[in-house]
Amino acid sequence: MAGEAARIDWKTVADAAARTADVTVRTVHNVADIHAVADFFADVWQTSRATPPYPSEVLHSLVHAGGAVHAAYCDRQSGERLAGAAVAVFGEPAERDVYSFVAAASASGHGVGFAVKQAQRLWALERGATSMRWTFDPLVSRNARFNLVKLGAVGSEYLVDFYGPMSDGVNNGDESDRLTILWDLASGTTRKDDPVDDRQAADVVRRAPDGGPLALADGDRLWCRVPEDIVALRAADPGLALQWRHAVREVFTDAYTEGLRATAMSRDGWYLLTRSPSPDVATVENRAEASAETAHEKTSSEATSKIPSDSYESASEEPK
């Protein structure tokens, strides 16, 4: 597996992803392009463009500090249209862990999010990185499936109310629990196995706020269900959405204490948590261990203390 991954031409992979999504992905540096990305993030997070989650001057400073703002453009008769964007930063030159602050794609841009992440991967690999981290809202199942299955990453840690209260149009009224994603840049690929396998034979160990099963257990495997659409539920019934937050939090915090990690998400909204990550995941965790603490201090604790961050395929939630 490792040998095969080492022979992968990631530029070819990134180019193919961009062609499939019918976009051009490039890093942006000038004031006008960076300002457009800031406006795009404001639209995704439903905030005023006057107060975007990532102001253009912040994005420009991150680029100046050695980070990258990737933007995906689709061609229209009226000219290029911004369809997706992502921001990532490096630590010291000796470090090999990259932190992705934010990534989002328009809901109409099928495959754009994947193309942006492949461009980020290529950029990071060319600069010596071996892993990439970011956070997302664990209740957003489509993002979980994208991160864990489409990208083949793993949920390395569960963070309780990571940002504190958030005032954007997507997260109002909720608590900001986040799942950290760890992506092995050299070998992370789409999962081929089905996380639904054997779920029906597992025992129900917890009930959800809607009365249905919340968690199922079978040996060293645990399945946890999340709402079909937490964004819609939060808008319609904030109290029930918060009950789901607390219920899923309890399952995840107990599971992570016991050494389980989120490794997959089914199409019908069930996480699969397993005790032993795949060999590739274990390898990247060991490689990143020495640099992760420093990188986390420089990015997560300071630069993203109140800002949504994550990755997805649509524009309705993708950054938390």
Image: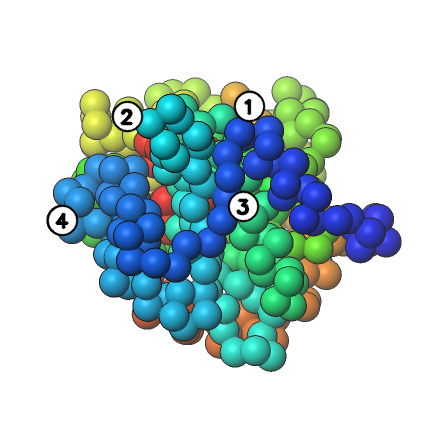
Q: Position of residue 215 (x, y in %)?
A: 51, 32
Question: Which circle's residue, 1 or 3, is located before the other in the chain?
Answer: 3
Which residue is disc 1 drawn over?
267
Q: Amino acid at mark 1?
A: Arg
Q: Position of residue 101 (x, y in %)?
A: 40, 56
Tell me the mark number nearer the camera, choosing from 2 and 3.
3
Q: What kind of residue is marked 3?
A: Lys
Reading the image, the residue beneath label 2 is 233
Q: Find the distance from the CA under tag 2 to the CA under tag 1.
A: 18 Å
Q: Which residue occupies the extreme right position in the image?
A: 3
Q: Which quadrant holds the C terminus?
A: top left
Residue 207 visible in image: no
Q: CA distance from mark 2 to mark 3?
A: 28 Å
Residue that carries the numbered disc 4 in the rendered image: 50
Relative to residue 118, is residue 11 drawn left or right?
right
- Image quadrant assignment for residue 283: bottom right
Q: Is residue 110 visible?
A: yes
Residue drawn at (24%, 56%) of the image: 55
Q: Earlier in the sequence, mark 3 or mark 4?
A: 4
User: Horizontal placement of 62 versus 12: left or right?
Assistant: left
Q: Where is residue 142? Give x, y as percent.
A: 47, 31
Tag 3 or tag 2, which sits nearer the N-term? 3
- Given residues 219 and 245, the one toward you in this image is 245
Image vertical order of residue 213 relative to residue 38, above or below: above
The residue that disc 3 covers is 117
On the image, which quarter does residue 196 sit in?
top right
